[in-house]
Image (cartoon, helix red, strand yellow):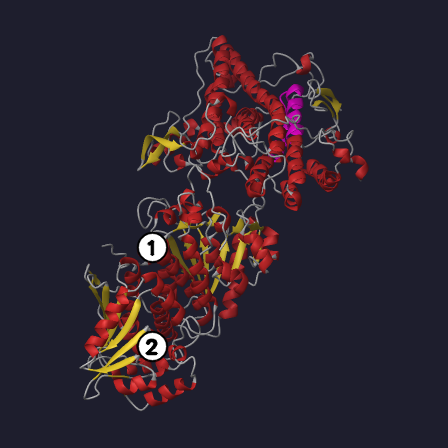
Amino acid sequence: MEHTQFETHPSRYKHWKLATNGAIATLKMAVDDEHPHKPGYELKLNSYDLSVDIELADAIQRVRFEHPEVKTLVVTADLDKVFCSGANIYMLGMSTHGFKVNFCKFTNETRLYLEDAAEDSGLATLAACRGTTAGGGYELALACDEVMLVDDGNSAVSFPETPLLAVLPGTGGLTRLVDKRKVRRDRADVFCTTAEGIKGKRAKDWNLVDQVVPRSKWDEAVAARAQVLTEKRAANFASGPAVELGPLESKITDDKFSYKFVEVTIDRAGRSANLLVRGPDSAAPSNLAGEGSNTWSLRAFRELDDALLRLRFDLPEIGMVTVRTTGDRKLVCAHDEALAKDASGFAREVRLLQRRVLRRFDNTARSLYAVADATDSCFAGSLLELALGADRFYMLIDGDEKIAVATSVANAGFFTSWSGLSRLGARFYGEPKQVATVLSRGTEGDISSEEAEKLGIATIAADDIDFADELRIAIEERASLSPDALTGMEASLRFVGPETVATKIFGRLSAWQNWIFTRANSTGPTGALTLYGRPERPQYQWNRT
Amino acid sequence: MSTIMNDERIPNNVNLSSDKRLQRALEAWQPSFLSWWQQMGPMGFQTHDIFLRTAVSVENDGWAHFDYVKMPDYRWGIFLEPKDPNRVHGFGDFEGQPVWDEVPGEFRNMLRRLIVTQADTEPASVEQQRLLGQTAPSLYDLRNLFQVNVEEGRHLWAMVYLLHTYFGRDGREEAEELLARRSGDSDKPRILGAFNEPTSHWLSFFMFTMFTDRDGKFQLAALAESGFDPLARTCRFMLTEEAHHLFVGETGVQRIVKRSCELMKQDPNGDARKGGGIDLVTLQKYINFWFSVCLDLFGGEVSSNAADAFASGLKGRFKEEKYAEHKLVESHFAMDVLEGGKVVHKDIAMRNALNEVLRTEYIKDCARGVERWNKTIKDEGIDFELKLPSNKFHRQIGIWTSVPFSPDGEMLTPEQWEANASKWLPSTDDEIFVKSLMHPVYEPGKMASWIAPPSKGINNLPGDFEYVRK
């Protein structure tokens, strides 16, 4: 099987150059066309694939942890006439449907992290587009706080996907156009069907960009704008100390992903896997930053993040994942409390990272059953979020009531899902008072399986006579259902509650995009994506649904 | 204002006097054009009488009406070849179907882009050449320069006519933009790279009209096959004028070659520079430079845009009718490509290879010109041969950009390239030398030291005819 490498480091980047200068960091896209993620296509004109986006995600993460002095991130390119021409079309053309979906999901998450950095870490982002900004390139720009476009009579921002490829801009572009930038929807309609895009004054008038600047004034205008953004941001956010993100030291085999705190065991015959997360192995730190990136709250969640990505990309046939925890519930809660009390910028970044990883968990298209069937199970505080985020939660009732869950400050609202609701809020969407009831009960100590079921935390609690069969049948039954229907069903139920830009992107735009990707008009024998770069023109089936 | 929009002021065969929409568009655009011409057109000589050819109709004798005229009063006209009511698509997916008289919505953007890209080169070359009048080697050449300039202006009019007539508001905006971009301007450059380099002296002007205008000829010829009939008819008429520009270039270089040979024979060491000429080695470097830059204008070797334009019936091949097959879905073109750092000969889907197909035709055409120059050298009894460099040499666009090649087409290391580049391309010293020869000669019948007189005058006029007068 393939093992995708998601860990990287600026010293190994092939496609980006990260440089910091005081409060301003510059991230330059300089895609090396000869090093695509897989052989078979060249990454011409700053087009991107998974390998490019993995580095982007890493760079954004590292700026937040390793360069807390940075207040403004300028995203730009190293080419003279091209900012970014979007996702590589030949790569999309030769990828499986499953890979495209996961690629699209990953790139969407990365762009949402850019916005999350702006919103919650005070890291302003400026897209400085000195040339063609097409498709995914413009979507990357849209994920930044502000967009500058060179005014050279030629460079345009564009969404050529629909007219040229018969697909959609799949990285949040349509949603951000009308919801974030509030571009008038009739103009957005014109823009999204004009392959060559819109440039200059009109791009500014339509609010497709914030500023258009002549080439000769470009560098000073970008520097000046970055300075303004930096000054606007300076006061509100705690900063640092800087902590370097160390290597995860994972051990990856075909049967098992092993990390210090996380382990994924794969059962291919059963098309299932078990995800085990271990609680802390030491007391809560008095000096959080002193532990660096090895502190449990950070390391365990980084490992979980890596494991989730590997599950998504490298284990497509594993549909059912049981989630277990092991450790000391009190220690988990103590680590959560220490993190919440710490007012440093580093502590904030750790909590935000945990929140992002939990969102990635919510957004993983696998059936997720949390299982508490051992006395050292530790669905407590931040790890209880995994049980609340799973599709179902099975608990074994033991005679001594040693199997239990616990709440901490981590369950009290900080860890919102993409809908903006906390996981308890999402669980009790129909009975909001129950959130306070559970949290208040949690302050009194562990909640046993039986009580957890009554409170609505456990889906099913059963004693040892019934439990094993109950769980086995639930898993086998789940594994027999259509994976497509399950993906749609799970996503619909997990994202109960209000819509946000993120839920719209994942639930509407990506869902449409992925449907369109499987249709003949894009990927059939005469579809536009199939024939892109080939001598024939596409032929469409004209029926509308 | 509308009084000037009549058939007398603007010679045309498109019923301008009864076309309200076109009149309105041109009323707004024409003053901008004239102000652009004053600002960016030839420097000086705007009040001189120039002996120019004006196209006044599409009849056989109508395209060449000679008279003295002041350039700003030149009657820039709008001419399309007469319509053939039975014309059908000659290639692509619509082969055999009647051609389009209106723009099909499906291809509107692609077509507009093609027209704008072609149109942008027309004013660009006028801008590039605006200072050359100051150093003309003779009145004959000065007049030819201005003839080329006003005709590039007319070609701009022809393209603007298409934008105004067929592309609505977008078209009018694009027409304005054509006058707003400026060759070499860092903020609003011309679209194609080669059109942002100044034509700094007359040797470059002749190279430009030999090589760059020849690219124009092939692009126009490919567009003359278009299934969008107004574009095809416009380009056909433009080709007549383009032929004259190529004549200026090819004979200009030929006259320099001839003069160099004469000077070589006069100098005991055979050095043409001694007598104020341009030696053949230097000439070869300029050929290397201009030919390679112009090859870039044809675009990438493997191109989906080229395939789209052909499939859609918008842009064909050079002389499409000489080919047997016009759909090209199954056929292939054998060409060199770069794979894993090696040159390999490979079959590429024909539609995707059409830029290379057109470039190949262009190279053949250039080679015929070089042959004629070599004949001049031979006739003068000199042992030297000018050559076109390899199509892989000194490329900035396409697959040959990542690795350097010699003029003979041998792959080089970057070090080998650095060590030899100044032998193959004009150096700063060469530029300084060529510029040092550039002094104006405005006396009728006289020639600068570095160029031989033409074999005959314009419209068969005598050699000392005053083509340009105050």
Kindly report the secondary structure that dominates the magenta region of the rendered protein. helix
Percent x, y of residue B37: 69, 35
**Sooner in the amino-acid sequence: mark 2 or mark 1:** 1
Secondary structure at numbered mark 1: helix
Q: Is residue B241 above or below residue A283?
A: above
**Is A323 left, or right, of B250 in this rendering?**
left
Tell me the distance, in whole angstroms, between the alpha carbons under discs 2 and 1: 28 Å
Q: Residues within 10 Å of mark 2 (few under 14, many from 20)?
A: many
How many numbered circles does the render carry?
2
Residue at image mark 2: A388
The answer to whether residue A543 is seen in the rendering is yes
Work out which residue is located at the far bottom of the displayed protein and give it: A444
What is the span of residues highlighted in magenta in the rendered image? Answer: B124-152
* Label at residue A99: 1
> Which residue type carries mark 1?
Phe
**Is B163 left, or right, of A258 in this rendering?**
right
Q: Residue B440 versus residue A349: which sits nearer the camera?
A: A349
> Which residue type carries mark 2?
Leu
**Is B367 left, or right, of A450 in this rendering?**
right
| Residue A224 part of the magenta-drawn span | no
Name the chain letter of the residue that bears numbered label 1.
A
Q: Residues within 10 Å of mark 1 (few under 14, many from 20)?
A: some
Query: In the figure, residue A365 lies in which quadrant?
Result: bottom left
Q: Residue B432 versus residue B362: which sits nearer the camera?
A: B362
| Residue B142 part of the magenta-drawn span | yes
Q: Quadrant of the N terminus of chain A?
A: bottom left
Q: Is residue A326 above or below residue A320?
A: below
